[in-house]
Every structure is written in structure tokens, then in C-alpha cells.
Image: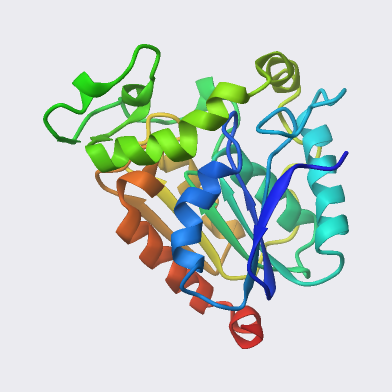
Amino acid sequence: MTLHHVSYGDGVPVLALHGWTPDHRLMTGCLEPIFAELPGYRRLYPDLPGMGQSPAGDIDSSDGIQAAVRAFIDEQIGTEPFIVIGESYGGYLARGLVAERPEQILGLGLVCPVGKLVHSERTVPEHVVLRTEPGVVESLTEGEDFTDLAVVQTAAALAAYRSDVAPGLAVADTEALDRIQRNWALSIGPESGPVYAGPTLIVCGRQDAVTGYADQFALLPHYPRATFAALDVAGHNLQLEQPELFGALIREWLQRLPSAATSG
């Protein structure tokens, strides 16, 4: 299976994996404004199977999705060292890749990552709204689910949601995703092997009612070079609710990657 993807720039490969149901636009929307100012990186944004323009085929598990990602890496990156960034479920896959290829992966970035895969086992806060602007909720069209997760309900956050998140939600193959979710856990646990010594960033939303922040703190012993940040006034879409702080953390993490910085 060849995953649909978009690519920008030249240099050290950066593989960006979006979360469950959206598509690559979730990642291009928040990362391209950062990387556009940083030469020396080749950014690869695939649509995961069953999402965006990548068909699910007969995939019925996360192992199948990971196999497709593995084939994509072999096709687009080969044996070259690369960086991986994963959001939510994409972070779960990214951790799995690190377990498989620790010597090839220069650094790991996790954005609102899944801590515990099963929803009922997660420690998450109640959904709250901490920042609003007049008229934003009233401007929503019928069927828009922006307010379901939004901690920041401003015009800027809504615009980012409409460009980065909603288009992927609209085209996802929900039947295939339901099938895959019945076998959602990877056969080999991401943290089942040796610790990963590469520079790592784990950034969570303090008010994230989907994946939370507490479960991810438990990952820190496995990633001794990790910066862990739980951002206030940020939910599961923290990248569009706290874009400036998100960008600063990503840039600082990239500066901790000497091989990547040298190549750039």
C-alpha cells in the first residue's frame, strides 16, 4: 500500500503522523509555519490508512497501519536517519517506530499523545472552556463539532480547526476505522524494549479531556532525554489553542538534535 502524502523542503527527513480520524492537514497546519523558517528539513506528511486519501484496504488492526507506515518509511526515507513527530494516536505509532528503529530515529516528538490506549482506562479531566470570544459559537454551522473538544473558543482557533481538523474528519472511512479499532493495540508494546536515549518532547494539554496529561507522565522513565510539558489553557487541539508556545517547544526540541542541526 502506498500512502497518500505531501512533502515540503529538503534535508533531514521529518515524518509527521496525524491522530485518529483526521488527515495530514492536522500536522501541516501546525508544523509548516515552524519548519518554513527552518531550512534543512524534508517534511513528510502521510495520510494514515482509512484516513484522508489513503484507503484502508483490508487492514484490520494497528499492526496493519504500522506495517503501512513502515513501508512508507522504507520507500521515502530508506535507511537515512530521520525525526518522527506524532499527534495523539500518531504518537502511539511513533513510539512503536522508536522501539523498532531506535538507532535510525534522531528524535521523538509527541503532541497530545495517547498514554493509555483504552479510553476507559485513561485519567482525563472534565472538558472545560477557558477562553472565548463573542460570536464564535454563534457562527458555527450545523454539524460542526468544534465545541466538543475546544478549550479555547476564539475566531483564530475556529479558523485553524476548520482548515486543519474538520476536512480530515469529513472524509475518514469510519467503517474501516471501526474495524481497525477492534484490534487497536500494537502487538509489540511501544515501551516494551530498551529505553530510548534520543531527544524527546512530550507536550500535553492540561485540560485535554481526550488523552489527558497524567498517563503520559508515566512514560518519562523510558525517555530519559524527554522534556515534558502540560500546557494550561489547552485541550486535545493544543497546537491550535497555544500555537506560540507549541512552536517554541518544537524549536527547542529540534535544537537538541545535533545530527539534524548539523545536517541543516
Residue 244 quadrant: bottom left
Question: In the displayed structure, does residue 95 sit left or right of residue 221?
Answer: right
Q: Residue furthest left?
A: 134
**Is residue 207 visible to us here?**
no
Question: In the displayed structure, does residue 142 sit left or right of residue 155?
Answer: right
Instruction: State the image coordinates of residue 135 (x, y, percent, origin top left).
Output: 15, 26
Instruction: State the image coordinates of residue 113 (x, y, percent, origin top left).
Output: 53, 43
Mark count: 0
What colour-coding does the image apply? rainbow
Say which quadrant the N terminus sits in: top right
Image point (30%, 25%), residue name: 126
Image point (82%, 50%), residue name: 72
Say which quadrant the C terminus sits in: bottom right
Question: In the displayed structure, does residue 111 sit left or right of residue 247?
Answer: right
Residue 63 quadrant: top right
Q: Where 200 falls versus 126 (above or below)?
A: below
Q: Where 161 falls versus 246 (above or below)?
A: above
Q: Where 146 falls versus 32 (above or below)?
A: above
Image point (73%, 17%), residue name: 182
Instruction: State the image coordinates of residue 157 (x, y, percent, origin top left).
Output: 30, 40
**Is residue 29 visible to us here?**
yes
Question: In the displayed structure, does residue 70 sit left or right of residue 34?
Answer: right
Image point (71%, 33%), residue name: 53
